[in-house]
Image (cartoon, rainbow, N blue to C red):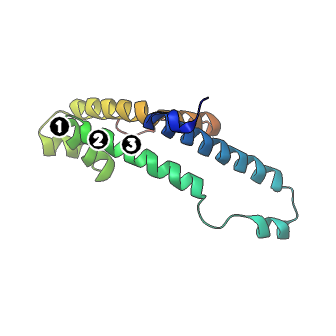
Amino acid sequence: MGKLADLDAEARRNWLRSVCRNKWIDGLRREARGEGLQPELGRLYSRVGPDPVDAVIAREDLERCWQVIRELQPRRRQVALLYFIEQQSELRIADLLDIQPSGVRKHGAKTREALRAVVGGIFDAESVETGTSQEGEGELA
């Protein structure tokens, strides 16, 4: 890889995300090795509060998500805001927007697809590590 200054903004963001993710993984490994320490040592060396690297990654991912939502078609954006932000049910959204519940689900699926295209790598890795599914029951799919 050449100099970081020679990279465009998106490439620098991707590089920074990789570095942050690798540092986060290193921290997890260090914490896992520390589990065998005596309890009093564990208390001394345990972290207090959120990891700053996690906060940076989460903030950047959140901004990317908002950018995707801002760029959605107006109806899809309405569905996304009502579901993800205001936590309305599919039936309530359908009633409010005068559309079928299947239309609400379709808009939700397309929104999730757009969001995963932007920040999906993180969520895919988490679901593999934790064994969880990306789609939960009762969620807008």
Task: Indicate which disc residue 75 carries.
Answer: 1
On screen, residue 11 versus residue 39, left or right, reads: left
Amino acid marked by disc 2: Ile
First reached walking from the N terminus: tag 1 or tag 3: 3
First reached walking from the N terminus: tag 2 or tag 3: 3
**Quadrant housing residue 76:** top left
On screen, residue 141 versus residue 103, left or right, reads: right
- In contact (CB < 8 Å): disc 2 and disc 1: no
Q: Residue 65: where, in percent of width, then height?
A: 37, 43
Amino acid marked by disc 1: Arg
Q: Which residue is mark 3?
A: 64
- In contact (CB < 8 Å): disc 2 and disc 3: no
Amino acid marked by disc 3: Arg
Figure check: 36 above or below 65: below
**Quadrant housing residue 64:** top left
For label 2, the SS is helix
Q: CA distance from mark 2 to mark 1?
A: 11 Å
Name the residue rendered at 80%, 64% in the picture. 42
Q: CA distance from mark 2 to mark 3?
A: 9 Å
Q: Which residue is mark 2?
A: 69
Residue 89 at least partly seen: no
Q: Depth-wise, is mark 2 or mark 1 nearer the camera?
A: 2
Figure check: 81 above or below 98: below
For label 3, the SS is helix
On screen, residue 1 versus residue 106, left or right, reads: right
Within 10 angstroms of label 1, few (less than 14), some, or many (20 or more) residues?
A: few
Taking depth in this image into account, of 35 and 105 the one nearest to the observer is 35
Q: CA distance from mark 1 to mark 3?
A: 20 Å
Name the residue rendered at 68%, 44% in the picture. 25
Q: Depth-wise, is mark 2 or mark 3 nearer the camera?
A: 3
Residue 108 at least partly seen: yes
Q: How many marks?
A: 3
